[in-house]
Image (tube, helix red, strand yellow):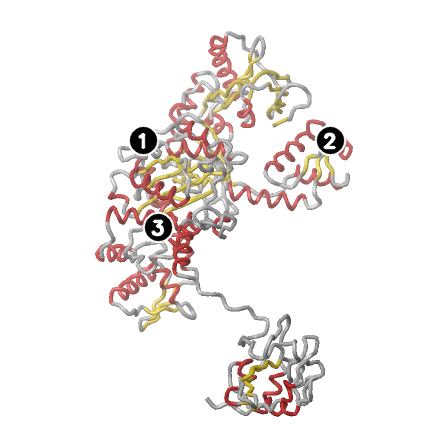
Amino acid sequence: MHLPPCPLRRIVENSPPHPLTSRPERTRHDLTIRSEQCANIGRLQAGSRVRQDKAPALAGAQAIACTSFLRRSSGTVARATVPVAPKSEDFRGPRRHRFSREPGCGTLPAGRAGKGRHVSSDDDFEPRLGRLRSRPPRRARRYLQRVLAATNLARGGAALAGRPGKQSAGSRIGRAAGVGRLLASRGRLSALERRRVVIKTRIVRLAGKGADAAAAHLRYLQRDGTTREGERGALYGPQSDAVDAKDFLARGAGDRHQFRLIVSPEDGAQYDDLKPLVRRLMARAEADLGTRLDWVAVDHFNTGHPHSHVIVLGHDQKGKDLVIAPDYLTRGLRERAAELVELDLGPRTTREIARSQLAEIKAERLTAIDRRLVRLAGEGRIVAARADGAFEQTLRAGRLAKLARLGLAEDLGQGRWQLAPDLPATLARMGERGDIIRTMQRAFSAARVERAAADQAIYGPAVPDAAPLVGRVLARGLADEHRDRHYLIVDGIDGRSHYVALGREPAEDVGEGSVVRVAPSRAGVREVDRTIAAVAAANSGRYDIDAHLAHDRQASEAFARSHVRRLEALRRGGVAVERLPDGSWRVAADHLERVERFETAQVRARPVVVELLAAEPLERLATADGATWLDRRLLSPADAPAREAGFGSAVRDAEARRRQWLVEEGLGSERGGVFEPRPGLIETLRRRELLRVAAALARELDLPFVESHAGSHVEGTYRRRLELTSGRFALVERAHDFTLVPWRPVLEPHVGKAVSGILRTEGISWTIGRGRGGPTIS
């Protein structure tokens, strides 16, 4: 290789004796430099050849060493290193070294071979190519080290043997993080050939009312009609086919959370029993997580896709919180389940794959073909039906024709199609509507009723002019068993059947056959919130009863206490209001904005309000000896009339029979086809039922009954709730007697506790506990 002449020769030959050197003969030698062996300064810096006239400038850059082979006159080869100026000097272009006569290069003083280094002799020199102060490159890992690292990753990111103090990032975010990433990264190209399993996972917090919701969810999973034989679902575990739900919940008492899984194989219909599959899957999960799991499961065969619900307690075998990596929950479990199903049924054949893809052409939902079309669409949402393969072109052309019939695609000619702007969202809504229609059809079949397609509707509470819905409950259930989204199917008095989404509100007190009133939930700031904000603003951000009474001279103490109860409800709901030790409340300046956000979130979680009008079937209300929903309709002409179709027709017949019964009982008269009720009809019927039920209770409790009137003080122990035709009543037992008063939902958690209150016409304001300082609930 030909190198340009090095300017170092002239520099060294003309240099005077070094003032610091102890060996003056070093510079007196007749040195000859072989330019073809001199390392080019520019090449060491930039890795490329440079011109001779640029070498001095490049030599002035920081951290450049020029290595030369110097040959003495005697023929002995010596080595020298020429560094740049000290670090403190500023290099901004060619500079003259203080020991040189040419800019950019210089000789090295003896004993100054480099920072912290000493050249002991002329032959003691080791060249290190690269940038100054750069670290040497890492040595390549051995094959054994790479194997150990892969083993560590598959183990879930635990520390390597012999390195107990070091953990991977995966172990910091949960168990089986490495396994989840490893499983998620494989099999992407062969996804069509693999057996598919849907795994839905959810982490449920158990704080607050979460434990009660978990118990209710477990009861719902064991409901009737979920097995192949239509019987009640049964819990099973790793070893037993029958697990007691109470014992399982007791083992999870104190847990921070629990895991809910839904395991649904695409080919689940080929399994006679899903228990072996679920048990093997959970055994694989225990091996991946490195701990035993406490779990129960129940199999459901009441839908078109057999599936299993698995509930895992939130602690490991040592009693600590069980934290599972998100990658394993979302994708790792799915891959493990697909492995097991593939072992049982074998890989999917080409015919099965083609059949499943052809079935997506006519589906009225979002499919894999639609997703591919959206990805391939170019500017203006235009996509071509042409594809590389004949089968793929058949799928595209058939799906585009189906979308055109649905109004979601337009044929532009020459094999070009334009997709609708909101195609994925529209197809997703159509899929949800199809699921709702199928749910309603199953409910109609179970209730043995027939409804035309035009008489099937979805109740929309978000519509601004949405009217309340009154009707009979045909069915209730979970629209989303994974996220606890409930629904009702109500056969309305308007002759139509309505699907009502309840959100997270289960409406457990509403049974099939009962009559309900469904009204939209409205979000907004209440008047009580405005009063609280006004009182707090006038008292430096604090609210209490004394401040309220001073702010509003006409307010009563009971009225002010209702505002305290509102603050308690807001605090439990997460609104930032603070109760101080002296009993007052600290209210923020933006209290109304916070309340509005809270109410909006409440409406999303509970879009409708369900009111029970009659717990008994309509057929019994016509002759019931008590104040019924039919009586209130007879006294309220403003109520919507019943239509002569569906449930409305049944309500009309029941109203006619009720009027006849009231006339026979002397509680009304009918003249010229017009019914005239006797004054005080509702109160008379309610009192008749109360006295009849109280007589039976007196014999059961061996205590006399004392009737309570408006304005009377009620005090005693709340025992239980009574379901009467006239409504729900609370049994309050005292030392020598008992009474019946209107029931409120807030009483139910306080069964067996002392309560007190004053009965009024609009209701009763309860105080829980003995003494004057207990919390008040209305």
- Judging by the rendered image, the residue that carries numbered circle 2 is 582
| SS at circle 2 | loop
| SS at circle 1 | loop
> In the figure, is residue 184 to the left or right of 3?
left
The residues bearing labels 2 and 3 have C-alpha atoms spaced at a distance of 57 Å
Q: Amino acid at mark 3?
A: Glu
> In the figure, is residue 655 to the left or right of 770?
left
Q: Residue at x 37, y 39 (%)?
A: 309
Pick out the residue farthest to the front.
74
User: Which one is closest to the eye, mark 2 or mark 3?
Assistant: 3
| SS at circle 3 | helix
> In the figure, is residue 53 to the left or right of 355?
right
> In the figure, is residue 594 to the left or right of 392?
right
Q: Amino acid at mark 1?
A: Asp
- Judging by the rendered image, the residue that carries numbered circle 3 is 335
First-in-chain label (3 vs 1): 1
Q: Amino acid at mark 2?
A: Asp
